[in-house]
Image: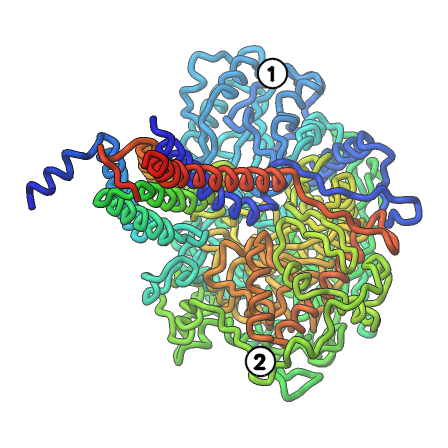
Amino acid sequence: MLDKVKSFLKERTFFYYLQAACGLLAFVGVIIFYIIDVTTIQGNITFTDESWLTLLFISIGFVGTIFTSVTNFKFAIIIPAIFYALGIGQHIYLLVFPFADLMTKVPFFTSNMDVANTVSTIFLVFAIIFIISLVGTIVASFSSLSKKERDI
Amino acid sequence: MKAKNIFRGLTATFASVLSICYFLSVLAFERTGDINSFLKIEVPTIDGTEENTYFKSDYATVDDFKKAQQEHIEEVQRQGSILLKNDNNALPLLSSERKVTIFGRTGAHLNYRGGSGGVRNDAASIDLKTALTNQGFQINEAVYNKLASYSESVDNGNIAEPDVSIYDGLSFDGYKDAAIVVLGRYGGEANDMDVVDKDGVRELSLHKEEQDMLNLVKNSGFEKIIVLVNSGYAMELSWLDEYDVDACLFIGFPGQYGMNGVVDLLVGNADPSGHTVDTFATNSLSSPAMQNFGDFVFENLSSQPQYKKEYLVYAEGIYTGYKYYETRYQDQVLGINNATGNYGVFASENSSWDYSDEMGYTFGYGLSYADFTQTLKSLTWDKETHEVTAVVNVKNEGDEVYQGKSQSVVQLYVQLPYTEGEVEKSAIQLIGYGKTIPLSPQEDYDVTITVSDYLFATYDNTAVNGSDTSKKGCYIFDEGDYYFSVGNDAHDALNNILSVTHPEATLFDADRNIVEGDPDLVSTQNLAEYDNVTYSKSETGEVVSNQFDDRDINYFYDEDVVTYLTRSDWSTFPKSYTNLTAADEIASVMTQSADSYKKASDAPSVDTTKYDQEKVYDLVEFREKDFNDPEWETLLNQLSIGDLSQMIGEHLGNSSISNVNYPENVSNDGPDGLNATNSYVLNAQFMAAATFNLDLITERGEIMGEQALWASSYGMAYAPGGNLHRTPYGGRNFEYYSEDSIVSYYCGWYQTKAMTEKGLLAAIKHFTGNDQETNRHGVATFMNEQTYRQNNLKAFEGAFTKGETLATMTAFNRIGVKPTSSDYETMTQVLRNEWGFKGINITDSSKDATTYMFTGECIMAGTTIFNNDVARSTDARNLIVKNNDGAIFNKLRESAKYFLYAYSRCNILNGYAKGVEAPNFTPWWKTAIYAVDGTLIGLTVISLGMFVYTAYFSKRKNKEEQQ
């Protein structure tokens, strides 16, 4: 069994590890973000926080990354890329509200300007993490992940 | 790189970008109004003919209009600035006094407006230095430049006054004719003043940095010390003597050109004639309302999310602002009802409440350069017409320094007969006011004030309704003596009355000077019989009786949890009701998570009502049709279900409806100037109120109407503001009129009337009970019915019943536990049935309130449309179509009638006549989004196709060819 794994990994390219690392980064990131969101953010904002959608999309993307990692399907890596992007889209959708408060200097969507600053920063930090994950996955999608990709 | 990898990468790239763009597109379409506003997108209009331009500008050119705005702003500033102190005629400055030094960060960074929506134009605003130099002043440039370069800006709870060391090394020599010290306080939307701010003190108190600065000024040998207060709030100002301040002028937020007016006052080009619309207490926390201001959370709901756990208790009852201080003063003078007890003591010595210690400047206070005498020539209370008419002669007695023209405010107050233990009444209350024309020295003028006695009727929730004796509650008049008085302020008027009712009493003023009231300024009128009939019905014929028993928090408990303040015993001064436990019934409503609206079992199906019928009429044909004209039904029949749903979801404007030729239009903020092309920032609304000049309030309404006319299809303004200054800490006090509901009643009436006559829908806001910003979303605001009707509702009532405004914006808070926009008793019973309102009832920005402001409930309660929330259209469509619900469909038709009735009287129909089609309008950015999204879809499909081909088919084909 160990030999099979060793053999499997031996066939993988740098981009294989890149997309796997990006997937892991996105998943760990979204878990941490969601915990912070539920425990800290949701009680202090006035917009409808649907971060569970971000969690859902990125989690599906991570499943896609696992699928990509354990199979040789050539199309597989497109799946996590799309779902990470959906997660980022949803995340940016939410990010705009606290940022609007910073721009207008009126804490309309957050309970006060301190909260606006904090929430914006949290959203922005995780947006960057998710974007890095997406970019890494897209870069990997331009390359072969294994030295011998399957033909299906 | 292999071709398949390139196309796979491109597919992933395009699909990813498309995915992100999808969400951004949704966001953009949801926030259409914000984007249009940000990009200054102009909605198309039709050039009108003389005949079909229904609302015309009074100005030939936009430059003429801009000039008129500037003149209005300057005049409001001259008449609204309040001279609080002027020792030894320190003001106006002599022509020889032109070398001055400006102190205070605010002196170089003025607050032109508060933090709220509307037009912003700080860069183009006239600052203090410019205004002074334009009048020939020489400014100490070194000091000014130092202040100007100070970069810290005001923020929540941070007044940003620099340490006094900023003046180190700077010389004042040569600029000592006067020190002009400018103090500022800034707040706004979602930004109340802080009870404990970032410096650890009351935000409205004098901070250490300011004290140090004033000491520096005091010890630097200036000839005169002038303080300008650039604040939207009643600051604590009882320290003026301590720092040898010679004169203090409260200038509020002056708008774009107001500083020209301020300098006119400083140099004596005009005489200030503003009066306070709020009480300036020695300690800003000392009012009974302040004890229950801020953040209060039900103990048993503390784990709930925002909007579902916060509450406020108006334990002060009717005793807001001066009504508390002055009523307690009377009892102090008379030595009754524990008035001098240790209850609510904040500034008095020896733990004994004392008016003169607690009071800085009372309501209605304001000095002029000139001296005036007022003589009450006559006062009649006609019990048949229910009008009180007072004629007051005002004479300008002149001044030894100032020889120009001056205006004087005449304030008419009343004291009602009060019996201990009966319904609460203030010892003094304003009922009307007027202002003289500009008078030269020795010139006199008669001011006639006519007021309806409705404005001093008392709402008694225990009374038997005189029109329907099966009901409880109505406005009443008790039998007895009614004392009417004019006075320079509320305290002066009360002293006049006390000089008649208690001639033996020792009267005094806020400085503890013994004074004698003037009995000649009092008229005593007797009412022989108790009257529970006259105002038991409204002008619409609706019985006015108790509707709000369950807005009193005690309703929900077996034993009272809150004791309301009563003048019969001042030991009832409210405590802070923290950590109350929500009764089950309260908790049930507060934590409601979904719309409770359900289709009734007997609800008709949608097709029992006509819709989408052949076009017969255009909306423009209904411009002058009465609301009850049967042809409205024909017009409504032309609307499709999609039209009805679309109307519900406003987007800082409304989309066109071709079925009735209703054109695309814009709505926006705000009370201090419309966010529109060619608008100037007006003086803060409360400064307009402080003029006590209703002609200027009318002019303000006209100016705002013109701002809309000089913009593009600007149909509705979310203005004016009508809430009360319940406390000095309310973040948006600057854009509400006053602490007094009668001032608000009059101002709302005159301003909305003027705006409406210009064709602008005046959505007076935030209706109602939204008197603080903290927890404004969903806060359960409890009060008894007398307080609600006499304070909160009364403040808005004039706009509806007299101003006949055609719009109102509702508040985020709850009245009791019911969200205001889904409170049937407020939205329909009072607003429409009692007051006869026929216009649009729009929520505040409801996207941010979806967790408690539910679509079905709001519509059924009487909400017409939802502000900046197009998703509500989908909600409405689903409610109608999914359940084939004719009940909510008919309610939406009713809303549509109010909607179309209001807009049929609006400037957006300028240029329209029968048969003129409303143009379709798609802003350029939406077209761009369609193009980008379409391109991305195309690129994704192409790259995916190429990937599939290169990865699977071309290789197979090669293999087949090789075989």
Q: Residue at x 80, y 56 (%)?
A: B905
Nearer to me, B898 or A112: B898
Circle 1 is placed at which residue position? B139
How many marks the image carries: the answer is 2
Quarter holding residue B448: bottom right
Question: Where's residue B876, x and y in %?
Answer: 59, 65
Q: Are dots 1 and 2 in contact, CB under 8 Å?
A: no
Up the image or down, B841 lies above or below B207; here it is below
Question: Where's residue B663, x and y in %?
Answer: 75, 51
Q: Residue B462 — which label?
A: 2
Q: Is residue B635 visible?
A: yes
Q: Residue at x 60, y 58 (%)?
A: B866
Dot 2, crowdedness within 10 Å: few (<14), some or many (≥20)?
A: some
Q: Residue at x 93, y 48 (%)?
A: B51
Nearer to me, B815 or B658: B658
Q: Are tags 1 and 2 found on a single chain? A: yes
Residue type at mark 2: give it. Thr
Separation of disc 1 and disc 2 at Cα?
63 Å
Q: Secondary structure at mark 2?
A: strand
Q: Secondary structure at mark 1?
A: strand
Left or right? Give the position of A144 relative to B123.
left
The chain identifier of the residue carrying mark 2 reads B
Up the image or down, A3 lies above or below B386; here it is above
Question: Where's residue B747, x and y in %?
Answer: 71, 53
Q: Quadrant of the N terminus of chain B?
A: top left
Residue type at mark 1: give it. Ile
Choose the circle earlier in sequence order: 1 or 2: 1
Q: Residue furthest left?
A: A2
Q: Residue furthest right?
A: B51
